[in-house]
Image (cartoon, coloured by chain):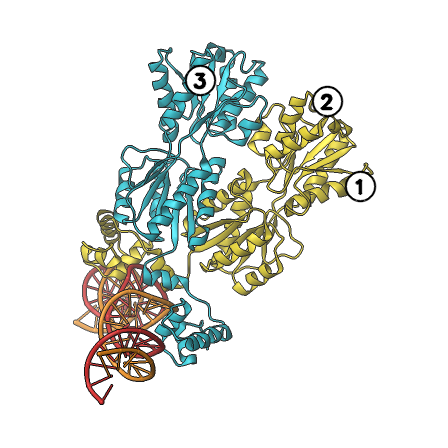
Chain colours: A cyan, B yellow, C orange, D red
Amino acid sequence: MSGRVTMRDLARAVDRSPMTVSRALRGDETVSAKTREMITKAAADLGYVYDSTAQAFRTQKSGFVAVTLPSINNANFAETFRGLSDGLENDTIQLLLGSTNYQVEKEHELVLQLLARKPQAIVLTGGHHAPQTRQLLENARIPVVEIWDLPEDPLGHVVGFSNADAMARMVHHLVENGRRKLAFVGATLGSDLRGSARRDGVIAAAQSLGLPDVTLIDAGPAPVSMHHGAQAITTLGEEILNYDALVCVSDPVAFGALSACQRLGFCVPEDIAITGFGHFDVAAVSSPRITTVGVHANAIGQRVAQVLHDIFEDKLEPQHIDVGSELVVGETS
Amino acid sequence: MSGRVTMRDLARAVDRSPMTVSRALRGDETVSAKTREMITKAAADLGYVYDSTAQAFRTQKSGFVAVTLPSINNANFAETFRGLSDGLENDTIQLLLGSTNYQVEKEHELVLQLLARKPQAIVLTGGHHAPQTRQLLENARIPVVEIWDLPEDPLGHVVGFSNADAMARMVHHLVENGRRKLAFVGATLGSDLRGSARRDGVIAAAQSLGLPDVTLIDAGPAPVSMHHGAQAITTLGEEILNYDALVCVSDPVAFGALSACQRLGFCVPEDIAITGFGHFDVAAVSSPRITTVGVHANAIGQRVAQVLHDIFEDKLEPQHIDVGSELVVGETS
DNA sequence: ACTCACCCTGTTATCGGTAACATGTTATCG
DNA sequence: CGATAACATGTTACCGATAACAGGGTGAGT
């Protein structure tokens, strides 16, 4: 015997056909108890290892679910992944993870690569995709779930929340606390589409409340880190005091901004308010605590797991789930 | 057009055989440039998606590399994953990721699950494994790479650094700056093995320098977060001033501790020094900046990618790579 | 013109399971 | 007792890509 042990070998050993072996190993009830026992024993004796690759090929069911994240180095996305992962634990599903680094072109390549593994569903973070990517996903004919956004023209299922609404609430909160001159600190225009939704939300809210135009502070290309936030504020220096609130695209940026303000000797929130987004640990632990938006990252993952579970049982109508978000008032506003 | 597009369809479209299409798509030089171009175009036009499952089946190579991380919600591990991912980009390798949540039992299950996919290699974060897990890995007869540690009895290749050495350097640094009464802030005993290596490193270094016994402050079960660090210090309150340095198991814990000290009105580093581990963003951005250990997380990933690359070309001897680490002095010591 | 080499492409068989359909054998019942 | 159902197993034909081997065509060298 040179090669590996296959079902054919087991079949020979117990004098049955490969088909019967296949059935036995998958727990098919129609195989007699005696035969099944013999086969189980033979498998152990011969050191047989089931070939799930062959199964995946033949049945055209990979047992994979593909997931794209803008970045895995982000506590919120990681948390969503974890929720999803935990939620699918007993579905014999393996998650295939890829990150797009916030680039649409990269997303296309990634989706192509992931689809090659014939996933049974694909979960995309974000609701903006290149036209060719949309085409690709439609051709693939597998369930698509878009998360962390509420896209206007969804490809399938959606589990997310409105970034714009969350920001509107934030602006209202700031106005209620006497702030009027807002600056938005975020990524360079066009480099972060979810960030854009937040920015547009701030601008729209400010307009509807009759505030002065919102100034945009460019902290660099996405993903914007703590460093970027700190850098942007440090560079502006005293100019920052032209505003009475810095609305940041995320908590890390807000923390960077807060830290920079402290180094510059400005008092937060007395001289200027600072707000973040995402309810990251750093926002709750920093001193002062940062006012932010809580986003239920883990819940998104869990809801997606539920949706997928339902899909695999019996196909259901496209779901459109809004998990919401909530203002978390800290000490910086 | 009923089913999905296969190589046969492309072959028909460009009037060539499936074999030629196969060669072209894999970049075989023997295919004429003109033919290759036609095929590429046809693939795009028809929306062809390569079937890696079929490839994996036919070639008996899964194209997978399995990776276990204690947690993906950790900037350093995420960074290692990214380095690995980037480094393997043009090897047509897909990474299979799983997280152990710092639990040995969970690691066993995870490894079992991952091995079922017949990965061509497996990368394990950490050098401590259950005996049965070791057995499993040996039986699998695939290359194993252990990372983020320098295990005494490695299963195969190693790409890591010495946690104990790094801590020894940290203790020396503290002593040089006049500190003697150290407390170590980390996870509950036994719940974090890499953390233990750090703790033991601190204790050993303190002993060899003739310092008083190091007090252990339990911040809770792994993974210990910023919250845990802050909580532990807040609980102790004034007692903290019995020590002149808090050596924390990680930067997030250190940041939590720093923040708690600030709230308690203690001055860092005047009243007490605080050090972290991992060179996370928060350590560099916080005010004051936290003294920490830089760990080359991304480099670990890249080196692993190189090792794997070499393994796939021509099997090589077990590699034992120490990527080192370095003291990063901030403003908290 | 003939041979040889090189370039490009085609043919065949197969990787290891399994869906769908077919068949033989043993209970069950009027 | 013959008919029919229930059960246990077998046959056939693939899933889609590719290794191995097999050409046909063109140009260079003699």
In this orientation, does residue A192 appear? no
Q: Which mark is residue B207?
A: 1
Q: Which dot, 2 or 3, sits closer to the camera?
A: 3
Left or right of A78 in this view: D7? left
Q: Are marks 1 and 2 in contact (CB under 8 Å)?
A: no
Picture residue at 43% right of the left edge, 13% below the top? A175
Picture residue at 64% right of the left edge, 37% below the top? B326
**Residue underneath mark 2:** B270
Q: Read off the chain for label 2.
A: B
Q: Tag 3: Cα neighbours inside 10 Å, few (<14), some, or many (≥20)?
A: some
Q: Which secondary structure lies at badge 1?
A: helix
Say how many tags the image has. 3
Amino acid type at mark 3: His
Viewer-proximal residue, A142 or A306? Answer: A306
Label 3, label 1: how far apart the Cα atoms are: 54 Å
**Residue underneath mark 3:** A173
Q: Which secondary structure lies at badge 3?
A: helix
Vertical comparison of A212 with A76: above or below: above
Viewer-proximal residue, B313 or B130? Answer: B130
Q: Which secondary structure lies at badge 2?
A: loop
Q: Tag 2: Cα neighbours inside 10 Å, few (<14), some, or many (≥20)?
A: few
Q: Read off the chain for label 1.
A: B
